Image (cartoon, helix red, strand yellow):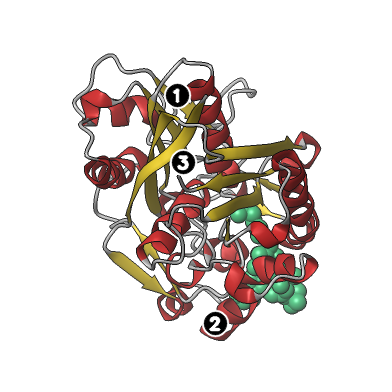
Amino acid sequence: MKKSIIKSSGMFVPPNVITNHDLEKILDTSDEWIKQRTGIEQRYWIDEEGVTGSSDLGFEASKTALDNAGWEPEDLDFIIFATLSPDIMFPGSGCLLQAKLGLNSTPALDIRQQCTGFLYGLATADAYIKTGLANKILLVGAEVHSSGLDKSTRGRDVTVIFGDGAAAVCIEGVETEKKAGVLASALHADGNFAEALTVELPASRLPVRLPPDVPINDARYYPVMDGPAIFKKAVRMMPRVIKESLEKAQMGLDEIDLIVPHQANMRINQAMGQFLKLDNDKIFHNIQKYGNTTAASIPLAFHEAMEQGRIGKSGDVVIFTGLGAGLTWGSVIYKFL
Ligand code: UT7
C-alpha cells in the first residue's frame, strides 16, 4: 500500500525583522510582557512599501521545498495552499502560486483552516495519495498577517503575537510495506466558538461588504481574540487529540521522538507537555523568532527541527498538533521512512 512520505521542506520569511522593542514604539506594550506571556522575541513582517501576498511568500518556500525534493513544478499533480490571509478575496492563493510556479493546469486547492491548515492539509494529501487521486503533492502554509493587524494599543493582544511567513512540504506516495509516512490523523472543529478569534469585515453576508458607515479603522476590520478562552481550550484539547491519534496509530507516547506543535504561545505548548508528562526537549519551539505564523507555523517548525537534526532519521516519529480559529484542532502522526 502507498504511504504518504514527506520528501522535503522549505521555508521563507520576509527580511523585515520586528523586535518587541520595535512594537514598544508604536503601541503600549513591553518586551518583558510579550516574552513572559508568549515567549516571542521577534517576528518578521513584510515591507510596508512593498506588494507581497501570501502566495509570494509561499512561492519562495515552495521553490526551496521543490529543490530539496529534486522536483520540477511540472512533477506536481496537486497543490494544497493553507492560509487565512489570502492575497485577494478570490481566486485563492493556491491558484496564484500555481501560476507563479509556471504551471497552467495542475489542480490547486485552498483551505481556510487557520492554525490547523497544515494538519488538515496533510490529512487531505494523505487521503488523495491513498485513494490514488494524486501522487506528488505540494502542501504550503503561508500568511501575511502584518497588513491586517490593528497596530494601535486597542489591538495589542493580537498584534504582538502574529508574524508573516511561509513553509512548504513535498509529499509523495511511496509503495512500501513498512509502517511509515502519515500513520494517523485526528481532526476536529467547533464553529460555536467562531467568534473567539475572528475578523468580521469585509463580510459577504452584509448587503455591502465594506459598509460605508463603518470607518476604516473600526475594530471589526481587525482580528479580535478571546485569548484566555483559546488558551484554555488549546491546553485541554491538544493533549486529548494527541491521545486520539496515538490510539488510531496503536502507538504509545513513549514511541514519539518529537512533538511539533503550532506555535501560538510557548506557555500553551509547555502546559501541553506537563499534561502529557513529557520532558521539555520532546516539544519543539521556535515561536521566539517568528511569532505565530498560523498556517505556516507547523511546517516552519518542522523544517527547522529537520535542519537542526532533531528529527529526520529513518524510523523517527513526529506528532504535529495545534488548535486555533474556527475553532479547529487536530493532530497527525508521521514516521520517517
Ligand atoms: O494561533 C491562534 C490561536 N491563538 C492562541 O492560541 C492564543 C491564545 N492566547 C494567548 O496566547 C494569550 O491569551 C495572550 C498572549 C493573547 C494574552 O495573554 P494573557 O496572559 O491571556 O493576557 P490577558 O488577555 O488575560 O490580559 C492580561 C493583561 C490585561 O491587562 P489588565 O486587564 O490585567 O490590566 C491586558 O490588557 O495584559 C494586558 N495586555 C497587554 N499588556 C501589554 C494584553 N495584551 C498586552 C500587550 N502588552 N501586548
Q: Position of residue 191 (x, y in %)?
A: 76, 35
- Contact, mark 3 vs mark 1 (Cβ under 8 Å): no
Is residue 317 shown above or below 31? above
Q: Amino acid at mark 1?
A: Leu
Q: Position of residue 315 (x, y in %)?
A: 50, 52
Q: Residue at image x 33%, y 57%? A: 13
Mark 1 or mark 3, which is nearer the start of the sequence? Answer: 3
Mark 3 or mark 2, which is nearer the start of the sequence? Answer: 2
Q: Which residue is tagged 1?
A: 109
Q: Residue at image x 53%, y 47%? A: 335
Q: Is mark 2 within 8 Å of ligand 1?
A: yes
Task: Confirm whether residue 230 shows in the render.
Answer: no
Q: Which residue is tagged 2?
A: 30
Q: Nearer the viewer, mark 2 or mark 3?
A: 3
Judge from the rendering whether residue 313 lies leftward or rightward of residue 66; answer left or right: right
Q: CA distance from mark 3 to mark 1?
A: 15 Å
Q: For residue 85, which numbered disc appears in the image?
A: 3
**Of 67 and 211, the residue lying toward us:** 67
Q: Position of residue 243 (x, y in %)?
A: 77, 50
